[in-house]
Amino acid sequence: MKLLVAIACIVAVAAPALGAEDQPGLDLSQPPKKDAPKDDGEELPPLDLTKPTQPPRDAKAPAKAAEEKPAAYQPFSEKDVALGDKVKAVQRKGFIKKGRFELAPVFSATVNDAFYQKMGYGARVAYNLQDSFALAIRGTRYEKLRTDNVREGKLAFQSQLVAADIVQQGMVDGVWSPVYGKAAVIAGSIVHFDLFLNAGFGLVWSSTSGAPLNQGPHWATDLGGGVRFYPKEWLAFELGLVATFYPDQPVALLPATVQKVFAANVGVSFFFPTSFEYVYP
C-alpha cells in the first residue's frame, strides 16, 4: 500500500514536467532588452549630441550672465559723416558788417541833364546796426560842366536856359542789404557781394539858394540802390545809382517845381575795425 502511494506521488510530480512543452502556461521570464549592448564585441552606435540632454536633478542651475553695461556716450564727430555729407547746404557768411563803422569816399556823375554835366565828390560815414541794415550820413558837392548842347539850345529856342542846378547836398540815409552772395572771379577766387537799397532825407543847396534869389537850402529826399563787392575783410567797392528830389523855384514869377537829379556813384568803403569774428547763432 505504501508502495502504491509513493508511485502515485512520483507520477503526479513528473507529469507536468514531461508535458510542459505542449501545454500553455504563464511565462514569468523577462525578454531581452533591444537596446542592451551585446557581448559579442560589436561596436556601439555613436552618441547623438544634437538632442538636448537633461541635467541631473541634483545639479545646480547656472548663474545668470551679468547684464552688460551701456557703452559710454561718445560725441558725434566729422569722422562719422560721409564725405558727401560734409558739404553744408547753407554755409556761413564770408563778410560780417554788424557793429562796424564804414568810411567811403564817393564820386558821382549826373546822368539826366542834357545841358550841364555835373561831377560830384563827397563821402559817406555809416554804422552797421545789423549785418543787413546801417545808418549813414552822406555829403556831396557838385561841379557844373557846360556842354555843347547849351549853345545849340540857345540858338534853337532863342532864349536863356533856366538855371536850377544842384550845388551840394547833405543826406541822412538808411541802407538795407536784403541780398547777399558770392561769385567766382579770375583764378577761381571767391568775392562776396551784396545788393543794397538806400533811402533818406536831408538838405540840398542849388543855384537859387544864394544871391540873387537867396532861397536858402531846400528840403530833399533820395532813393537809390546798388551793389558792393568785398575782396578784403576791411575793403569794399561800390557801384550805385541814386535819385534826389527837391523843390526849387528858379524864377520868382513862376511856381516852384520838383527837381530830379539822377547820379551814378562809384565808391570805396573802408571798415573799422578792420577784421571781424563770426559768431554762430
Image (spheres, rainbow, N blue to C red):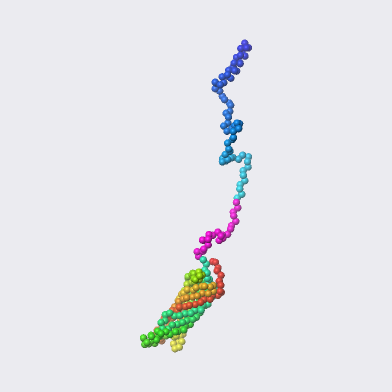
Residue 39 position within the rendered picture, expressed as x and y whole percent measured from the top left: 61, 31
* Residue 266: in magenta span: no
Q: Residue 115: name its quadrant.
A: bottom left
Residue appearing at x 58%, y 29% in the figure = 32
From this view, report whether residue 248 is shown above or below residue 13. below
Residue 120 position within the rendered picture, expressed as x and y whole percent measured from the top left: 47, 81
Residue appearing at x 62%, y 14% in the figure = 6
Residue appearing at x 61%, y 49% in the figure = 66
Quarter of the C terminus within the rendering: bottom right
Instruction: Return the residue nearer the eye: 223 or 86.
Output: 86
* Residue 70: in magenta span: yes
Q: Residue 160: name its quadrant.
A: bottom left
Side (left or right) of 67 relative to 246? right
Instruction: Return the residue nearer the eye: 215 or 161.
Output: 161
> What are the residue bounds of the magenta stretch?
68-90
Residue 218 position within the rendered picture, expressed as x and y whole percent measured from the top left: 45, 82
From this view, report whether residue 252 is shown above or below residue 137. below
Residue 134 position within the rendered picture, expressed as x and y whole percent measured from the top left: 51, 74
From this view, report whether residue 257 is shown above or below residue 86. below
Quarter of the N terminus within the rendering: top right
Q: Does the image show residue 237? A: yes
Q: Does the image show residue 199? A: no
**Magenta region, mostly helix, strand or loop?**
loop
Spot the residue most to the top: 1
